[in-house]
Image (spheres, rainbow, N blue to C red):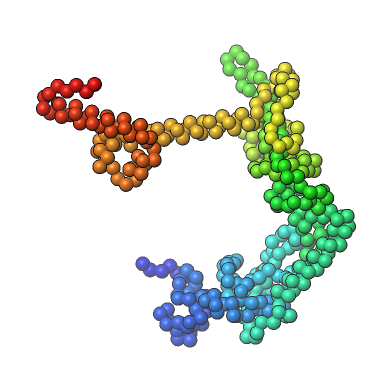
Amino acid sequence: MNEPEHEPNELTKRLFAEGYTRENYPDYVKPYFWFYGGFTYTLEHLRKMVFSTPCGLLVSGDHFTNGSMSYMGIDWIPENDNPTITCPRFSLKEPCQINHELLRGCGLLSRSGKIVSCACHQVNEPYDYERSCDKVIDDVNKESNELFEEFNIQKGGRACRLQSYYDRHTKQWHMNYDPRGCATYGCSFCNVLQTELCHKKGNVYYDEIVTHTEKGKGLFPDKVVTTATKGKKLLKHQASLTLCEAIVKYAKWRIIEQKMGSYEHKERLKIRSDPNFSVQYVNFRAESRETRDLMDDLANIQEGIEVVHASDQQKEIKAAKHERRVSAREAKKNKLKKRIFEVGFSGLDELELRRYQKWFRPEEEDAIVEEIESKKILEKSLITGEQTKLF
Protein backbone atom coordinates (compact mmCIF):
# COMPACT_ATOMS: atom_id res chain seq x y z
CA MET A 1 0.00 0.00 0.00
CA ASN A 2 1.43 3.33 -1.07
CA GLU A 3 1.75 6.07 1.53
CA PRO A 4 -0.34 9.19 0.81
CA GLU A 5 1.42 12.34 -0.20
CA HIS A 6 2.43 14.40 2.84
CA GLU A 7 4.76 17.37 3.08
CA PRO A 8 7.87 16.35 5.05
CA ASN A 9 8.68 18.48 8.08
CA GLU A 10 11.84 20.61 8.23
CA LEU A 11 13.65 18.14 10.49
CA THR A 12 13.14 15.35 7.96
CA LYS A 13 14.31 17.55 5.09
CA ARG A 14 17.47 18.44 7.00
CA LEU A 15 18.28 14.82 7.90
CA PHE A 16 17.81 13.68 4.32
CA ALA A 17 20.09 16.52 3.18
CA GLU A 18 22.71 15.27 5.64
CA GLY A 19 22.59 11.81 4.09
CA TYR A 20 20.28 9.98 6.46
CA THR A 21 17.59 7.64 5.11
CA ARG A 22 14.28 6.25 6.36
CA GLU A 23 16.08 3.16 7.62
CA ASN A 24 19.23 4.94 8.84
CA TYR A 25 18.56 7.85 11.20
CA PRO A 26 20.10 9.40 14.36
CA ASP A 27 19.09 8.16 17.82
CA TYR A 28 17.45 11.45 18.85
CA VAL A 29 14.51 10.95 16.44
CA LYS A 30 11.72 8.38 16.22
CA PRO A 31 11.37 6.04 13.22
CA TYR A 32 10.09 7.60 10.01
CA PHE A 33 6.29 7.95 9.90
CA TRP A 34 4.69 9.76 6.96
CA PHE A 35 1.66 10.85 9.01
CA TYR A 36 3.82 13.16 11.15
CA GLY A 37 5.83 14.46 8.22
CA GLY A 38 8.65 11.93 8.63
CA PHE A 39 10.99 11.98 11.61
CA THR A 40 10.02 13.47 14.98
CA TYR A 41 12.11 14.12 18.09
CA THR A 42 12.12 11.58 20.88
CA LEU A 43 10.58 12.86 24.11
CA GLU A 44 13.90 12.54 25.92
CA HIS A 45 15.65 14.72 23.35
CA LEU A 46 12.79 17.23 23.08
CA ARG A 47 12.85 17.81 26.85
CA LYS A 48 16.53 18.74 26.63
CA MET A 49 15.96 21.27 23.83
CA VAL A 50 15.64 25.00 24.53
CA PHE A 51 13.49 27.39 22.52
CA SER A 52 12.94 31.13 22.55
CA THR A 53 9.91 33.34 22.03
CA PRO A 54 10.19 36.21 19.54
CA CYS A 55 10.86 38.56 22.47
CA GLY A 56 13.71 36.42 23.81
CA LEU A 57 12.09 34.45 26.63
CA LEU A 58 13.53 30.95 27.00
CA VAL A 59 11.18 27.97 26.82
CA SER A 60 12.00 24.40 27.84
CA GLY A 61 11.13 21.65 25.37
CA ASP A 62 8.90 20.16 28.09
CA HIS A 63 6.25 22.66 26.99
CA PHE A 64 5.93 20.93 23.60
CA THR A 65 5.70 17.25 24.56
CA ASN A 66 1.92 17.07 24.50
CA GLY A 67 -0.04 18.15 21.43
CA SER A 68 0.57 20.61 18.62
CA MET A 69 -1.22 23.24 16.56
CA SER A 70 -2.12 23.44 12.87
CA TYR A 71 -3.18 26.80 11.49
CA MET A 72 -3.28 28.38 8.02
CA GLY A 73 -1.86 25.23 6.45
CA ILE A 74 1.19 25.19 8.73
CA ASP A 75 2.07 22.63 11.39
CA TRP A 76 3.46 24.60 14.35
CA ILE A 77 5.71 21.91 15.78
CA PRO A 78 9.29 21.58 17.10
CA GLU A 79 10.25 19.64 13.95
CA ASN A 80 9.39 22.74 11.90
CA ASP A 81 11.20 24.98 14.42
CA ASN A 82 7.99 26.91 15.12
CA PRO A 83 6.18 25.39 18.15
CA THR A 84 3.78 27.76 19.91
CA ILE A 85 3.02 28.75 23.48
CA THR A 86 0.48 31.13 24.92
CA CYS A 87 1.95 34.62 25.08
CA PRO A 88 2.82 35.28 28.76
CA ARG A 89 2.81 39.08 28.31
CA PHE A 90 -0.90 39.49 28.87
CA SER A 91 -0.59 43.27 29.22
CA LEU A 92 -0.10 43.66 25.46
CA LYS A 93 -3.20 45.25 23.91
CA GLU A 94 -1.95 45.64 20.35
CA PRO A 95 -0.74 42.75 18.11
CA CYS A 96 2.91 41.94 18.73
CA GLN A 97 4.85 43.00 15.64
CA ILE A 98 7.76 40.62 16.31
CA ASN A 99 5.49 37.55 16.42
CA HIS A 100 4.98 35.46 13.28
CA GLU A 101 2.82 37.46 10.88
CA LEU A 102 0.18 34.70 10.64
CA LEU A 103 -0.28 34.67 14.43
CA ARG A 104 -0.45 38.40 15.10
CA GLY A 105 -4.17 38.75 14.52
CA CYS A 106 -5.05 35.25 15.74
CA GLY A 107 -6.39 35.23 19.28
CA LEU A 108 -8.98 33.57 21.47
CA LEU A 109 -11.20 35.81 23.57
CA SER A 110 -11.76 34.70 27.16
CA ARG A 111 -12.77 36.22 30.49
CA SER A 112 -9.06 36.45 31.29
CA GLY A 113 -8.39 38.54 28.19
CA LYS A 114 -7.24 37.75 24.69
CA ILE A 115 -5.11 34.61 24.42
CA VAL A 116 -2.44 34.82 21.70
CA SER A 117 -0.02 32.14 20.51
CA CYS A 118 3.69 32.90 20.09
CA ALA A 119 5.84 31.01 17.58
CA CYS A 120 9.12 29.87 19.13
CA HIS A 121 12.40 28.74 17.59
CA GLN A 122 15.26 26.60 18.89
CA VAL A 123 18.30 28.30 20.42
CA ASN A 124 21.70 26.86 21.22
CA GLU A 125 22.03 28.02 24.83
CA PRO A 126 21.25 26.58 28.27
CA TYR A 127 17.88 27.10 29.90
CA ASP A 128 17.86 29.97 32.42
CA TYR A 129 14.79 30.35 34.62
CA GLU A 130 15.50 34.05 35.24
CA ARG A 131 15.16 34.71 31.48
CA SER A 132 12.36 32.21 30.90
CA CYS A 133 8.72 32.26 29.98
CA ASP A 134 8.03 30.25 33.15
CA LYS A 135 9.32 33.09 35.33
CA VAL A 136 7.11 35.65 33.55
CA ILE A 137 4.08 33.41 34.08
CA ASP A 138 5.01 32.83 37.72
CA ASP A 139 5.36 36.60 38.20
CA VAL A 140 1.93 37.14 36.64
CA ASN A 141 0.40 34.52 38.94
CA LYS A 142 2.14 36.02 41.97
CA GLU A 143 0.83 39.47 41.07
CA SER A 144 -2.69 38.12 40.52
CA ASN A 145 -2.61 36.43 43.93
CA GLU A 146 -1.58 39.68 45.60
CA LEU A 147 -4.31 41.59 43.76
CA PHE A 148 -6.86 38.98 44.81
CA GLU A 149 -6.04 39.64 48.46
CA GLU A 150 -6.75 43.34 47.87
CA PHE A 151 -9.93 42.41 45.99
CA ASN A 152 -11.03 40.19 48.89
CA ILE A 153 -10.52 43.06 51.33
CA GLN A 154 -12.67 45.30 49.12
CA LYS A 155 -15.38 42.62 49.23
CA GLY A 156 -15.25 42.47 53.01
CA GLY A 157 -13.63 39.03 52.97
CA ARG A 158 -16.51 37.56 50.95
CA ALA A 159 -14.66 37.02 47.66
CA CYS A 160 -14.57 33.45 46.41
CA ARG A 161 -11.59 32.45 44.27
CA LEU A 162 -13.62 29.77 42.51
CA GLN A 163 -16.34 32.27 41.63
CA SER A 164 -13.90 34.95 40.45
CA TYR A 165 -11.73 35.49 37.40
CA TYR A 166 -8.71 37.66 36.72
CA ASP A 167 -8.41 39.86 33.63
CA ARG A 168 -4.69 39.78 32.87
CA HIS A 169 -4.92 42.77 30.54
CA THR A 170 -6.57 45.17 32.99
CA LYS A 171 -5.06 43.42 36.06
CA GLN A 172 -8.45 43.38 37.77
CA TRP A 173 -10.41 40.69 39.56
CA HIS A 174 -14.15 40.21 38.95
CA MET A 175 -16.64 38.02 40.77
CA ASN A 176 -19.96 36.76 39.41
CA TYR A 177 -21.50 34.78 42.25
CA ASP A 178 -23.62 31.85 41.12
CA PRO A 179 -24.11 29.25 43.87
CA ARG A 180 -25.09 26.58 41.34
CA GLY A 181 -21.40 26.06 40.62
CA CYS A 182 -20.69 25.66 44.35
CA ALA A 183 -22.74 22.45 44.34
CA THR A 184 -19.83 20.75 42.52
CA TYR A 185 -16.89 22.31 44.42
CA GLY A 186 -17.06 20.27 47.62
CA CYS A 187 -16.39 23.22 49.95
CA SER A 188 -17.14 22.99 53.68
CA PHE A 189 -17.14 26.75 54.31
CA CYS A 190 -18.53 29.45 52.01
CA ASN A 191 -16.59 32.71 51.96
CA VAL A 192 -19.41 34.53 50.17
CA LEU A 193 -22.07 33.46 52.66
CA GLN A 194 -19.58 33.49 55.56
CA THR A 195 -20.99 30.28 56.98
CA GLU A 196 -20.30 26.59 57.36
CA LEU A 197 -22.20 24.49 54.85
CA CYS A 198 -24.97 22.36 56.31
CA HIS A 199 -24.16 18.64 56.21
CA LYS A 200 -27.79 17.82 55.42
CA LYS A 201 -28.28 17.52 51.68
CA GLY A 202 -31.19 18.27 49.42
CA ASN A 203 -32.14 19.71 46.06
CA VAL A 204 -33.79 22.72 44.50
CA TYR A 205 -37.32 21.98 43.34
CA TYR A 206 -39.50 24.13 41.11
CA ASP A 207 -42.77 23.98 39.18
CA GLU A 208 -43.19 24.34 35.43
CA ILE A 209 -46.52 25.70 34.20
CA VAL A 210 -47.17 25.21 30.48
CA THR A 211 -50.13 26.67 28.61
CA HIS A 212 -50.95 25.56 25.05
CA THR A 213 -53.83 25.17 22.65
CA GLU A 214 -55.25 21.69 22.28
CA LYS A 215 -56.73 21.22 18.85
CA GLY A 216 -60.40 20.24 18.81
CA LYS A 217 -61.81 17.28 16.91
CA GLY A 218 -65.01 17.29 14.90
CA LEU A 219 -67.59 19.49 16.57
CA PHE A 220 -65.36 20.12 19.58
CA PRO A 221 -63.58 23.50 19.40
CA ASP A 222 -59.96 24.23 20.27
CA LYS A 223 -59.25 24.39 23.99
CA VAL A 224 -56.56 26.22 25.95
CA VAL A 225 -54.97 23.77 28.40
CA THR A 226 -52.68 24.60 31.31
CA THR A 227 -50.53 21.91 32.91
CA ALA A 228 -48.49 22.35 36.08
CA THR A 229 -45.62 19.90 36.50
CA LYS A 230 -44.60 20.17 40.13
CA GLY A 231 -41.46 19.15 41.98
CA LYS A 232 -38.95 19.21 39.11
CA LYS A 233 -35.34 18.84 40.28
CA LEU A 234 -32.82 21.51 39.32
CA LEU A 235 -29.58 19.73 40.35
CA LYS A 236 -28.50 16.35 39.04
CA HIS A 237 -27.07 15.44 42.43
CA GLN A 238 -27.92 16.46 45.97
CA ALA A 239 -26.02 19.33 47.56
CA SER A 240 -25.82 21.02 50.95
CA LEU A 241 -29.12 22.62 51.89
CA THR A 242 -27.16 25.81 52.56
CA LEU A 243 -26.22 25.96 48.88
CA CYS A 244 -29.73 24.97 47.77
CA GLU A 245 -31.15 27.89 49.75
CA ALA A 246 -28.51 30.21 48.24
CA ILE A 247 -29.44 29.05 44.73
CA VAL A 248 -33.10 29.88 45.37
CA LYS A 249 -32.18 33.29 46.78
CA TYR A 250 -29.41 34.42 44.42
CA ALA A 251 -29.67 32.38 41.21
CA LYS A 252 -33.40 32.00 40.56
CA TRP A 253 -33.50 34.80 37.99
CA ARG A 254 -30.53 33.31 36.13
CA ILE A 255 -32.22 29.92 36.01
CA ILE A 256 -35.44 31.36 34.60
CA GLU A 257 -33.53 33.51 32.10
CA GLN A 258 -31.46 30.57 30.85
CA LYS A 259 -34.44 28.26 30.55
CA MET A 260 -36.47 30.88 28.65
CA GLY A 261 -33.53 31.49 26.31
CA SER A 262 -32.57 27.85 25.85
CA TYR A 263 -32.57 26.07 22.50
CA GLU A 264 -35.18 23.62 23.83
CA HIS A 265 -37.54 26.46 24.74
CA LYS A 266 -37.11 28.18 21.38
CA GLU A 267 -37.75 24.91 19.55
CA ARG A 268 -40.95 24.37 21.52
CA LEU A 269 -42.12 27.83 20.46
CA LYS A 270 -41.08 27.21 16.87
CA ILE A 271 -42.74 23.79 16.57
CA ARG A 272 -46.02 24.76 18.18
CA SER A 273 -46.61 28.12 16.47
CA ASP A 274 -49.24 28.57 19.15
CA PRO A 275 -50.14 32.14 20.20
CA ASN A 276 -51.34 30.78 23.54
CA PHE A 277 -48.16 28.87 24.25
CA SER A 278 -46.29 30.01 27.36
CA VAL A 279 -44.04 28.55 30.03
CA GLN A 280 -43.59 29.75 33.60
CA TYR A 281 -41.02 28.57 36.13
CA VAL A 282 -42.28 29.24 39.64
CA ASN A 283 -42.17 28.17 43.28
CA PHE A 284 -38.44 27.56 43.64
CA ARG A 285 -37.67 25.98 47.00
CA ALA A 286 -34.86 24.14 48.77
CA GLU A 287 -35.91 20.85 50.34
CA SER A 288 -34.22 17.72 51.63
CA ARG A 289 -36.89 15.74 49.77
CA GLU A 290 -39.90 16.60 47.65
CA THR A 291 -43.00 17.67 49.55
CA ARG A 292 -46.48 18.08 48.13
CA ASP A 293 -49.01 20.75 48.96
CA LEU A 294 -52.34 18.96 48.57
CA MET A 295 -54.36 22.12 49.17
CA ASP A 296 -52.41 23.96 46.46
CA ASP A 297 -52.96 21.04 44.06
CA LEU A 298 -56.72 21.11 44.74
CA ALA A 299 -56.80 24.88 44.23
CA ASN A 300 -55.04 24.49 40.86
CA ILE A 301 -57.44 21.76 39.79
CA GLN A 302 -60.43 23.98 40.68
CA GLU A 303 -58.93 26.66 38.45
CA GLY A 304 -58.87 24.17 35.56
CA ILE A 305 -55.11 23.48 35.74
CA GLU A 306 -53.98 19.92 35.18
CA VAL A 307 -51.55 18.92 37.95
CA VAL A 308 -48.83 16.29 37.58
CA HIS A 309 -45.80 15.61 39.73
CA ALA A 310 -42.35 15.10 38.24
CA SER A 311 -41.59 12.26 40.66
CA ASP A 312 -44.68 10.36 39.46
CA GLN A 313 -43.57 10.86 35.86
CA GLN A 314 -40.11 9.51 36.71
CA LYS A 315 -41.66 6.47 38.40
CA GLU A 316 -43.79 5.79 35.33
CA ILE A 317 -40.77 6.14 33.04
CA LYS A 318 -38.73 3.85 35.28
CA ALA A 319 -41.54 1.28 35.45
CA ALA A 320 -41.98 1.34 31.67
CA LYS A 321 -38.23 0.92 31.20
CA HIS A 322 -38.20 -2.02 33.62
CA GLU A 323 -41.13 -3.59 31.78
CA ARG A 324 -39.30 -3.26 28.45
CA ARG A 325 -36.22 -4.90 29.95
CA VAL A 326 -38.26 -7.77 31.40
CA SER A 327 -40.04 -8.31 28.07
CA ALA A 328 -36.74 -8.25 26.18
CA ARG A 329 -35.20 -10.74 28.62
CA GLU A 330 -38.20 -13.08 28.34
CA ALA A 331 -37.97 -12.95 24.55
CA LYS A 332 -34.28 -13.88 24.71
CA LYS A 333 -35.00 -16.67 27.19
CA ASN A 334 -37.73 -18.11 24.98
CA LYS A 335 -35.41 -17.97 21.98
CA LEU A 336 -32.66 -19.79 23.91
CA LYS A 337 -35.19 -22.31 25.24
CA LYS A 338 -36.35 -23.03 21.70
CA ARG A 339 -32.76 -23.60 20.62
CA ILE A 340 -32.21 -26.03 23.51
CA PHE A 341 -35.18 -28.08 22.29
CA GLU A 342 -33.71 -28.05 18.76
CA VAL A 343 -30.05 -28.93 19.46
CA GLY A 344 -30.00 -30.02 23.09
CA PHE A 345 -27.60 -28.78 25.78
CA SER A 346 -24.65 -30.34 23.96
CA GLY A 347 -25.38 -28.19 20.91
CA LEU A 348 -25.07 -24.87 22.75
CA ASP A 349 -21.91 -22.82 22.38
CA GLU A 350 -20.03 -21.36 25.35
CA LEU A 351 -21.85 -18.01 25.27
CA GLU A 352 -25.28 -19.67 25.10
CA LEU A 353 -24.39 -21.91 28.05
CA ARG A 354 -23.35 -18.89 30.14
CA ARG A 355 -26.61 -17.14 29.30
CA TYR A 356 -28.55 -20.26 30.21
CA GLN A 357 -26.85 -20.47 33.61
CA LYS A 358 -27.46 -16.76 34.20
CA TRP A 359 -31.07 -16.47 33.05
CA PHE A 360 -32.78 -19.68 34.21
CA ARG A 361 -33.69 -20.53 37.79
CA PRO A 362 -33.25 -24.10 39.10
CA GLU A 363 -36.99 -24.85 38.86
CA GLU A 364 -37.00 -23.62 35.26
CA GLU A 365 -34.03 -25.87 34.48
CA ASP A 366 -35.89 -28.87 35.94
CA ALA A 367 -38.94 -28.09 33.80
CA ILE A 368 -36.82 -27.85 30.64
CA VAL A 369 -35.04 -31.14 31.37
CA GLU A 370 -38.37 -32.86 32.07
CA GLU A 371 -39.85 -31.48 28.85
CA ILE A 372 -36.81 -32.67 26.84
CA GLU A 373 -37.11 -36.19 28.34
CA SER A 374 -40.84 -36.24 27.56
CA LYS A 375 -40.08 -35.21 24.01
CA LYS A 376 -37.52 -38.03 23.67
CA ILE A 377 -40.02 -40.61 24.97
CA LEU A 378 -42.68 -39.35 22.56
CA GLU A 379 -40.29 -39.49 19.61
CA LYS A 380 -39.25 -43.03 20.57
CA SER A 381 -42.87 -44.20 20.73
CA LEU A 382 -43.58 -42.76 17.30
CA ILE A 383 -40.60 -44.62 15.87
CA THR A 384 -41.38 -48.02 17.50
CA GLY A 385 -45.16 -47.69 17.21
CA GLU A 386 -45.59 -48.25 20.93
CA GLN A 387 -48.20 -46.32 22.93
CA THR A 388 -46.51 -44.53 25.82
CA LYS A 389 -48.32 -42.92 28.70
CA LEU A 390 -46.62 -39.65 29.52
CA PHE A 391 -48.81 -38.51 32.37
Residue 184 falls left or right of residue 169: left
Quadrant of the rendered image containing residue 153: bottom right
Image side of residue 389 versus residue 8, left or right: left
Residue at the location (34% across, 45% down)?
351
Residue 184 at x, y = what percent? Answer: 69, 50
- Which is more toward the observer, 85 or 4? 85
Q: Position of residue 178 (x, y in %)?
A: 76, 48
Is 146 or 90 nearer to us in this picture?
Answer: 146
Outermost residue, left direction?
Answer: 384
Q: Position of residue 302 (x, y in %)?
A: 72, 17
Which residue is at a point 85% across and 58% down the rendered structure image? 152
Q: Nearer the viewer, residue 25 or 188?
A: 188
Q: Is residue 108 above or below residue 55?
A: above
Q: Is residue 8 visible?
A: no
From what the image shows, is residue 45 above or below residue 192?
below
Residue 361 visible here: yes
Expressed as whole percent of the image width and height from the top left, the position of residue 345 reads 27, 40
Q: Classify the position of the C terminus by image quarter.
A: top left
Task: Residue at 78% x, 69% y: name it.
Answer: 142
Residue 377: name its quadrant. Answer: top left
Q: Is residue 51 above or below residue 258?
A: below
Outermost residue, top side: 219
